[in-house]
Image (cartoon, rainbow, N blue to C red):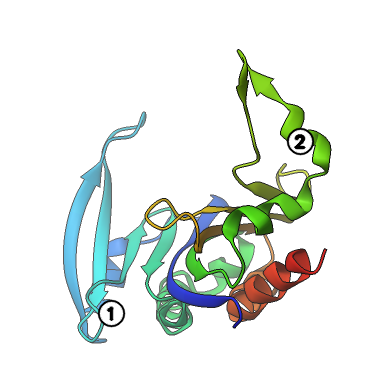
């Protein structure tokens, strides 16, 4: 048997760090003509309420695009649904901003969560990244053991590209399943899209490399 993705969820943020604001009323007019249902909400901020529009595809109402004057966020499950929704959301963005879209500095953050079947006992898998001395650590006489691990690339500071890969036992089945959270941050659109296009395969590949240690 092999590592198997059973559930996935992604939040893809495309937010303007510096640049023009988006006319969300104009976005709403386009989105409702693209087979999306529309809702609104107000979020309190230090500068006053921020109005957000929530667009749900009629064919997949558990996923949505959240739009504000600062950009958009896609909340999709499973992961396969994010790219079609991103194409729509980005098309709205370009249509409304026109040439101004090229002048904005945008930060993209992709937060993915996977529930994954582990073909070996979870404790054995997690311990592969720790040496035997880890078992000698205790707190107030109680033995502590590794509960998970995090791998990372980049400093996490803007605007450097950052990747974080966190693995822990899935609480509802800690002996046979993993919860994997992969976080990506970048200012480069193409790199962000490549990350999400390959995310399923990269997660499984990375777990496989750890299992071989």
* Residue drawn at x 62%, y 47% as measured from the top left: 148
Count of numbered tags: 2
* Residue drawn at x 29%, y 70% as measured from the top left: 26
Q: Is residue 107 above or below residue 63?
A: above
Q: Residue furthest top?
A: 140
Residue 102 horizontal side relative to residue 152, left or right? left
Question: Can you give x and y, in whole percent of width and height, for residue 90 in the image?
Answer: 47, 75
Q: Is residue 23 above or below residue 8?
A: above
* Residue drawn at x 66%, y 53% as measured from the top left: 126
The crowd level at tag 1 (other Cα within 10 Å; few <14, some 14-19, many 20+) is some
* Disc 2 target residue: 134
- Quarter in which the N terminus is drawn: bottom right
Q: Nearer the viewer, residue 1 or 183?
A: 1
**SS for tag 1?**
helix
Question: Can you give x and y, in whole percent of width and height, for residue 177 in the image?
Answer: 49, 63
Question: Can you give x and y, in whole percent of width and height, for residue 30 in the image?
Answer: 28, 79
| Residue 136 occupies quadrant | top right
Question: Can you give x and y, in whole percent of width and height, for residue 71 in the image?
Answer: 44, 59
* Disc 1 target residue: 30
Q: Nearer the viewer, residue 66 or 133?
A: 133
The crowd level at tag 2 (other Cα within 10 Å; few <14, some 14-19, many 20+) is few
The answer to whether one can see residue 108 in this image is no
Residue 115 horizontal side relative to residue 139, left or right? left
Residue 172 horizontal side relative to residue 142, left or right? left
| Residue 120 occupies quadrant | bottom right
């Amino acid at each position: 048997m092999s590592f198997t993705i059973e559930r996935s969820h992604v939040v893809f943020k495309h937010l303007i760090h510096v640049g023009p604001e988006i006319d969300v009323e104009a976005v709403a007019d386009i989105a409702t003509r693209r087979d999306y249902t529309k809702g609104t909400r107000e979020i309190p901020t230090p500068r006053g309420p921020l109005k957000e529009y929530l667009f749900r595809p009629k064919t997949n109402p558990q996923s949505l695009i959240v739009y504000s004057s600062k950009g958009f966020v896609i909340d999709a499950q499973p992961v396969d649904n994010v790219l079609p929704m991103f194409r729509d959301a980005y098309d709205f963005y370009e249509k409304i901003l026109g040439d101004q879209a090229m002048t904005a500095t945008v930060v993209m953050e992709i937060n993915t969560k996977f529930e994954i079947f582990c073909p070996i006992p979870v404790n054995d898998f997690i311990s592969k990244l720790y040496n035997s001395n880890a078992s000698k650590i205790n707190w107030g006489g109680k033995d502590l053991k590794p509960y998970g691990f995090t791998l990372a690339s980049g400093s996490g500071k803007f605007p450097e590209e950052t990747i974080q890969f966190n693995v822990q036992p899935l609480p509802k089945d800690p002996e046979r399943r993993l919860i994997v959270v992969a976080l990506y941050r970048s200012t480069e659109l193409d790199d962000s899209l490549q990350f999400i296009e390959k995310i399923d395969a990269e997660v499984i590949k990375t777990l496989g490399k750890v299992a071989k240690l």
